Amino acid sequence: MAAASPSRLVLYGNSMWTSPYVLSCFVGLTEKGLPFDVRAVALNEGAQHVAAYVQVSFTARVPTLIDGDFSLSESSAIIEYLEDRWPAPAHPALLPGDVRDRARARQIMAWVRSDLGAIREERSAEYVFYPHDTLPPCAPLSASARRAVDKLVSFAERVIPADGGALFGAWSVADTDLAMMLQRLVKTNEPLPERLRTFAQREWQRPSVSAFVNASRPPHRPAGP
Ligand SMILES: N[C@@H](CCC(=O)N[C@@H](CS)C(=O)NCC(=O)O)C(=O)O
């Protein structure tokens, strides 16, 4: 008797395809070469609060990964799960192999999720993924966002190589996460050192990333109350 085929992986993401956390997981699954389906959760309609979604996500947020009878949310936990469940070298790595590079990659991933809130608020991800003529114009950055930009630039200058290439010699998902934060400034024409701009633009050309960037999106709709 043939073995039952494992059920296809599912990634729940927001229907506007703007979540940096979903981006990370989408890229992780794509880089691993795993077949998966994306299911849209209409956050602006409150679909994340529907009981069936809360049951699988635990957090009422996207992303959530479904792997058979197991479900997991929190993007960094999902990345770690993918790396543990489909490990290198049998599968492409999402994190560097060297223990210190791996720790640094995790630092970057944790940092862009927990700090720099003023950049996230004043340069929302919609400006990265939607044409700007469909969005309200950006106000100049506040003093606190300027401080966050300075902090981001000085951090990024320490970790991005002189040629604007991958952070750790070979690609890791930390490249995508750092590039996403930089793209908030690139796409809104904030001045940035050329090396950082090159890094962010190069990462945006990576097939796994451009598949997300170029996904078909519904017309822009502001978040609901
Ligand atoms: N720490 C979480 C953050 C996830 C998150 O905040 N997702 C947002 C979309 S970018 C969300 O689902 N928001 C729903 C809501 O605020 O109700 C992760 O890394 O996955």
Image: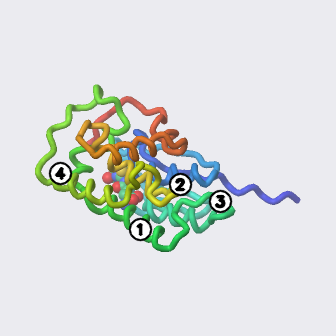
Q: Nearer the viewer, residue 149 or 67?
A: 149
Q: Amino acid at mark 3?
A: His
Helix, strand or loop at disc 3? Answer: loop
Drawn side of residue 105 relative to residue 98, left or right: left
Q: Which callout, 3 or 1, points to the residue nearer the camera? A: 1
Q: Are marks 3 and 4 in contact (CB under 8 Å)?
A: no
Q: Earlier in the sequence, mark 1 or mark 2?
A: 2
Helix, strand or loop at disc 2? Answer: helix
Helix, strand or loop at disc 1? Answer: helix
**Residue drawn at point x = 28 percent, y = 46 percent:** 193
Q: Are marks 4 and 1 in contact (CB under 8 Å)?
A: no
Q: From mark 1 to mark 2, how far is it between C-alphas?
A: 18 Å
In the current view of this chain or complex, which residue is farthest to the bottom? 99
Q: Which mark is residue 28?
A: 2
Q: From mark 4 to mark 2, how far is it between C-alphas?
A: 29 Å
Q: Amino acid at mark 1?
A: Arg
User: Callout 1: 10 Å neighbours few (<14), some, many (20+)?
Assistant: some
Q: Nearer the viewer, residue 13 or 91?
A: 91
Drawn side of residue 134 relative to residue 62, left or right: left
Disc tally is 4
Residue highlighted by disc 3: 91
In the current view of this chain or complex, which residue is farthest to the front? 162
Helix, strand or loop at disc 4? Answer: helix
Ligand 1 picture quarter: bottom left
Residue highlighted by disc 1: 104
Q: Position of residue 217 (x, y in %)?
A: 43, 33
In the current view of this chain or complex, which residue is farthest to the right? 1
Q: Earlier in the sequence, mark 4 or mark 2?
A: 2
